[in-house]
Image: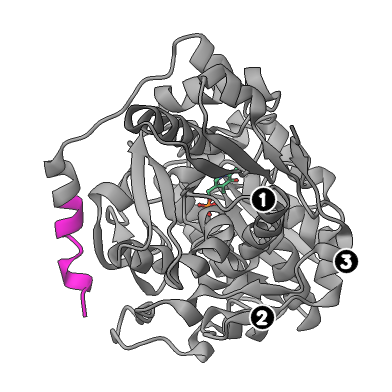
């Protein structure tokens, strides 16, 4: 039985796929928070280079991948598609389970797929330095690598508590040549105000975003970069699904179900959108985005305009959200602790083209450990959510007496997340729940933001 499906460098896709061209209902526009009017490309120019802004608003079906970007992709792409034969055997299922493995990248996740083109377009426009924030450190690591590749400086504002608790992520970023500052820092107004109020504050992602944006807006030669949520980020990630499509053809199959975890939506979009193209054209397919039960914007949030960050600095985005002030429990899948979902994924869910599931972290770690013991790869805690859903689908197929072909995104390995596994084995991880009233009150406060 064939286990690995590999492509050659020549088969790296030449274009990214833009699902907006094929969506029955186009995404609603982002709004300026003061005027509630749709945002124009010029409003974003202080933050992003023009080519990325044009991708952000594009409805062209395909966007050509620059040659320099395809060259850089060759460092780790094409990534393998693997059939999880040992997992299938252990589960005792007739279902075929395939995974696309994005952990072979320099930072160990799918994030360099967008970090590379983002650094490239900034370099092309003459930008000298990129600022960003990082929570758990996956995005900061990917951008550090990409900036070094194209000769840009990279300043990463890392949430103080992660900076202290995840020293190896900081070491990785330093190895790739980035400057890493614990946030809040003394370098920005936002940081100084926060430190003035509480010198021992653990920081937050919202505050780190504020610091990174402040440094970019205040300097002509500096721009800002985001690792998820935005349309251009999702676009770049479609390299994953396009490769997987060719590899599934090699395997002689088309998936019945495509599964990926969802934080902001980029790795889910990356794997599923090239397959959803066929669903929109009439083919049968289920695409399931999996979120943590402790941060369930897709399954318990509301589709509304909301800010992208905790502080309210970003444009208003039409998305499924728990409210920008929602504080998710400190689960170990740091990449999934975000209050909203990308505008495109939100519209697709609203239109019934994708599904969503929420799973508690103990079930996720149980699935991740089973995967490690059968397939030999320790998954990132985020990826465990996808694996737990795969197991649910296998059990459902057994009950229904059907055989399914399931494809999921192993979006990263967990080598820098072993503390999370230690906590799981020590019985320190717990499930989190909250009441409908708690969700409703966060969301009620969004009424004033609606156009
Ligand atoms: C960042 C990250 C995520 C969540 O972000 P998405 O944009 O939803 O993909 C999930 N898994 C890993 C490994 C990540 O690094």
Q: Earlier in the sequence, mark 2 or mark 3?
A: 2
Q: Which residue is mark 1?
A: 252
Q: Disc 2 vs disc 3: Cβ atoms closer than 8 Å?
A: no
Task: Looking at the picture, tell me which residue is in the foreground, 385 or 419.
Answer: 385
Q: Is residue 101 visible?
A: yes
Q: Is residue 211 visible?
A: no
User: Does 5 appear above or below 17?
Assistant: above
The question of residue 449 being in magenta is answered with yes
Q: Position of residue 53 (x, y in %)?
A: 58, 82
**Residue located at (87% from left, 57% from top):** 8
The image quadrant that residue 427 belongs to is top left
Q: Which residue is mark 3?
A: 71
From this viewpoint, which residue is outermost toward the top?
A: 426
Left or right of residue 237: residue 441: left
Q: Which secondary structure, mark 1?
A: loop
The magenta-colored residue range is 441-451
Q: Position of residue 208 (x, y in %)?
A: 52, 54
Q: Specify few, some or many for label 2: CA neighbours under 10 Å numbering under 14, 14-19, or 20 or more.
A: some
Task: Looking at the picture, tell me which residue is in the foreground, 208 or 436.
Answer: 436
Distance of label 2 from label 1 (alpha carbons): 28 Å
Q: Specify few, some or many for label 1: CA neighbours under 10 Å numbering under 14, 14-19, or 20 or more.
A: few
Q: Which secondary structure, mark 3?
A: helix
Q: Which residue is mark 2?
A: 63
Q: Earlier in the sequence, mark 2 or mark 1?
A: 2
Q: Position of residue 356 (x, y in %)?
A: 35, 49
**Cβ of mark 1 under 8 A from ligand 1:** no
Quadrant holding the C terminus:
bottom left
The image quadrant that residue 285 belongs to is bottom left
Q: Disc 2 vs disc 1: Cβ atoms closer than 8 Å?
A: no
């Amino acid at each position: 039985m064939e286990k690995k499906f590999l492509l050659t460098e020549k088969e790296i896709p030449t274009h990214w796929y833009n699902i907006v061209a094929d969506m029955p209902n186009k995404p609603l526009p982002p709004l300026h928070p003061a005027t509630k009017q749709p945002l124009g490309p010029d409003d974003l120019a202080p933050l992003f280079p023009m080519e990325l802004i044009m991708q952000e608003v594009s409805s062209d079906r395909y966007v050509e991948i620059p040659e320099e970007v395809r060259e850089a992709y060759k460092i780790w792409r094409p990534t393998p598609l693997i059939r999880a034969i040992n997992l299938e055997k252990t589960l005792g299922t007739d279902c075929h389970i395939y995974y696309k493995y994005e952990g072979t990248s320099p930072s160990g996740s799918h994030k360099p797929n967008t970090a590379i083109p983002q650094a490239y377009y900034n370099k092309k426009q003459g930008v000298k330095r990129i600022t960003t924030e990082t929570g758990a450190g996956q995005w900061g690591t990917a951008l550090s690598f990409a900036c070094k590749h194209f000769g840009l400086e990279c300043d990463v504002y890392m949430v103080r508590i992660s900076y202290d608790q995840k020293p190896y992520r900081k070491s990785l970023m330093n190895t790739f040549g980035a400057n890493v500052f614990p946030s809040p820092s003394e370098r920005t107004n936002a940081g100084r105000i926060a430190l003035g109020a509480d010198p021992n504050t653990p920081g937050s992602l919202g505050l780190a975003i504020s610091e990174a944006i402040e440094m970019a807006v205040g300097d002509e030669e500096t721009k800002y970069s985001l690792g998820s949520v935005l349309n251009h980020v999702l676009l770049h990630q479609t390299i994953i699904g396009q490769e997987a499509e060719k590899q599934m053809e090699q395997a002689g199959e088309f998936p019945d179900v495509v599964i990926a975890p969802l934080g902001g939506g980029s790795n889910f979009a990356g794997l599923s959108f090239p397959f959803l193209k066929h669903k929109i054209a009439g083919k049968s397919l289920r695409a399931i985005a999996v979120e943590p039960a402790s941060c369930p914007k897709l399954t318990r949030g509301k589709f509304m305009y909301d800010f992208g960050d905790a502080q309210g600095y970003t444009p208003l985005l039409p998305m499924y959200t728990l409210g920008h002030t929602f504080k998710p429990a400190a689960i170990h899948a740091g990449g999934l602790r975000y209050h909203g979902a990308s505008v495109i994924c939100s519209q697709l869910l609203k239109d019934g083209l994708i599904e969503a599931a929420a799973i508690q972290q103990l079930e996720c770690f149980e699935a991740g450990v089973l995967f490690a013991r059968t397939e030999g790869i320790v998954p990132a805690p985020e990826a465990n959510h996808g694996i737990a859903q795969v197991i649910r689908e296998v059990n459902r197929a057994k009950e229904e007496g059907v055989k399914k072909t399931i494809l999921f995104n192993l979006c990263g390995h967990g080598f820098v997340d072993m503390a999370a596994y230690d906590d799981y084995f020590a019985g320190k991880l717990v499930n989190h729940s909250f009441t409908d009233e708690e969700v409703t009150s966060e969301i009620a406060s969004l009424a004033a933001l609606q156009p």
